[in-house]
Image (spheres, grey):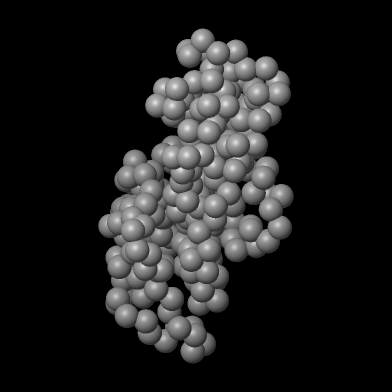
């Protein structure tokens, strides 16, 4: 397999998940019990990740709990949510830089809402790690719909079998691209790190890469098995 590109999910891969403390504080801020708040947060998420406006999304979260959010509360929740997903994993970003130095192309392919997408695009230097960026909120299409994968592949200029997909959700990598006769290579969770190395370089150990560079192995992170 000739891998030319690595495509990263964002939440749980390039950044850490929200902490229990962050979620509990957000729940208290809007007056909903923490467990109920977390369930509602994800229940209505798909429309939000397709580009639904933040006010409509957050009001859909509050209404089942009998809470009506005013504009100021919505603004506060949007700010908190951006903070949820702003703890970038610098170890993974360092690996992204090493992959590019070794001659591979890199991409973000993520289901995320407009406020987070806008925040990432406004974060100095963050998107400089990537040759191509695909945010679901900008396309109105979500993983695992095949259109969003094809969009990312076209942007990278690679065939499906030339890309590795890294995601923390199995349903987002267990797919067959309709324009490819073989399973597109992909990895999820703790399954992936040594297998990613073998897929990229055909061996577990570091070896000489293009123009004498080192072939970078994925970071080994204690206690981390969500990418």
In this picture, residue 158 sits left or right of residue 200: right
Tell me residue 171's x, y (percent): 34, 41
Give the residue displayed 58% in from the left and 27% down from the top: 29
The image quadrant where one finds the N terminus is: bottom left
Please state which of residues 8 and 183 is positioned toward the viewer in this rendering: 8
In this picture, residue 132 sits left or right of residue 17: right
Q: Is residue 53 above or below residue 216?
A: above
Give the residue displayed 48% in from the left and 66% down from the top: 91
In this picture, residue 121 sits left or right of residue 155: right
Q: Is residue 168 above or below residue 127?
A: above
Please state which of residues 151 and 194 is positioned toward the viewer in this rendering: 194
Q: Is residue 108 visible?
A: no
Please state which of residues 177 and 211 is positioned toward the viewer in this rendering: 211
Give the residue displayed 60% in from the left and 63% down from the top: 129
The image quadrant where one finds the C terminus is: bottom left
Tell me residue 167's x, y (percent): 40, 50
Q: Quadrant of residue 112?
A: top right
Residue found at the very far top of the displayed protein: 66
Tell me residue 183's x, y (percent): 31, 53
Please state which of residues 56 and 62 is positioned toward the viewer in this rendering: 62
Count up the numbered dots. 0
Q: Is residue 58 visible?
A: yes
Give the residue displayed 69% in from the left and 53% down from the top: 123
Tell me residue 173's x, y (percent): 36, 48
């Amino acid at each position: 397999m000739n891998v030319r590109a690595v495509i990263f999910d964002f939440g749980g891969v390039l950044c850490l998940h929200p902490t229990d403390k962050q979620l509990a504080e957000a729940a208290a801020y809007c007056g909903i019990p923490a467990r109920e708040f977390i369930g509602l947060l994800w229940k209505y998420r798909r429309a939000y990740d397709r580009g639904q406006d933040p006010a409509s999304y957050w009001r859909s979260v509050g209404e089942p709990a009998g809470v009506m959010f005013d504009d100021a509360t919505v603004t506060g929740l949007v700010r908190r949510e951006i903070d949820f997903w702003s703890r970038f994993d610098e170890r993974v970003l360092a690996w992204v830089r090493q992959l590019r130095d070794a001659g591979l192309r890199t991409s973000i392919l993520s289901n995320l809402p407009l406020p987070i997408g806008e925040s990432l695009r406004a974060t100095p230097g963050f998107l400089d790690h990537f040759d191509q960026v695909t945010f679901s909120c900008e396309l109105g299409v979500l993983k695992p719909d095949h259109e969003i994968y094809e969009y990312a592949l076209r942007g990278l200029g690679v065939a499906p079998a030339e890309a590795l997909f890294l995601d923390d959700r199995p349903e987002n990598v267990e797919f067959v691209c309709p324009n490819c006769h073989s399973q597109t290579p992909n990895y999820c969770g703790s399954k992936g790190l040594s297998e990613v190395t073998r897929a990229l370089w055909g061996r577990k150990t570091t070896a000489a890469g293009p123009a004498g560079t080192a072939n970078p192995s994925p970071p080994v992170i204690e206690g981390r098995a969500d990418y």
